[in-house]
Amino acid sequence: MYASVMTRRGPRGPVPIYLTIVNAIRADIKNGTLKPGQALPTEAELGETHGASRLTVRKALAVLREEGVIYTVRPEGSYVGPEDAPKIRKLWPFEQVASAVVEGIKKGGYEPDEVLPSETEMMVEYGVAKKTVRAAVALLREQGWVYTVPAIGTFVSSRDKWPDVE
């Protein structure tokens, strides 16, 4: 539960693992490895990296939250502060699928009013669960890329309904 730490003056004694985690995250922020708005590794990843339990990792994150160094958005995870910094994180699987479909639409792989592959075909193509495909299609509908006709399928929207494309 303790790690010894060396200082310029020599060993200073055992340091609780949660403080080792706190100091490692502070160092990553200071040296630019972690940037404002960037998602921190998950509790499980931090625990594995530091050989610590989730409880210990949570204690470390609580210290950093109290100091205003990080903030947490449930259920997304913790981010480097300040809270108004744009979030930098990996896309969720449903966002990755939606992004791939948008790229296909932009490149002309799917024309307006053309039906998209079925849920089952998309599950196989992207290696994801049905729930993930459904969330991706819901996102695409919300953004205006596609529309769904119940019991028929999901189709690419006309170009005038697409969001502004860079």
Image: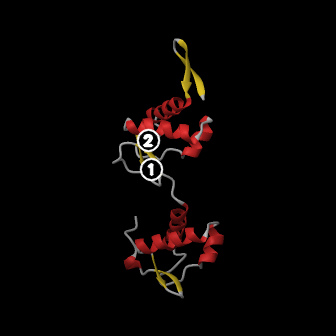
Nearest to the observer: residue 144 or residue 79: 79
Residue under label 2: 35
Rounded to the nearest whole Å, what is the CA distance between mark 2 and mark 1?
A: 8 Å
Reply above or below: 23 against 127: above
> Which residue corresponds to the image point at 42% horizontal and 81% vertical from the top-left?
158
Q: Is residue 121 left or right of residue 59?
A: right
Q: Amino acid at mark 2?
A: Lys
Q: Earlier in the sequence, mark 2 or mark 1?
A: 2
Nearest to the observer: residue 154 or residue 164: 154
The location of residue 43, given as percent across then percent down, is 54, 44
Nearest to the observer: residue 143 or residue 138: 138
Disc sitting over residue 88 in the figure: 1
Reply above or below: 33 against 100: above
Q: Amino acid at mark 1?
A: Ile
Nearest to the observer: residue 9 or residue 146: 9
The location of residue 156, given as percent across then percent down, is 48, 79
Q: Is residue 32 left or right of residue 84?
A: right
The quadrant of the picture occupied by the C terminus is bottom left
Q: Secondary structure at mark 2?
A: loop
> Which residue corresponds to the image point at 53% horizontal and 29% vertical from the top-left?
20
Residue 47 visible, this orientation: yes
Q: Are marks 2 and 1 in contact (CB under 8 Å)?
A: yes
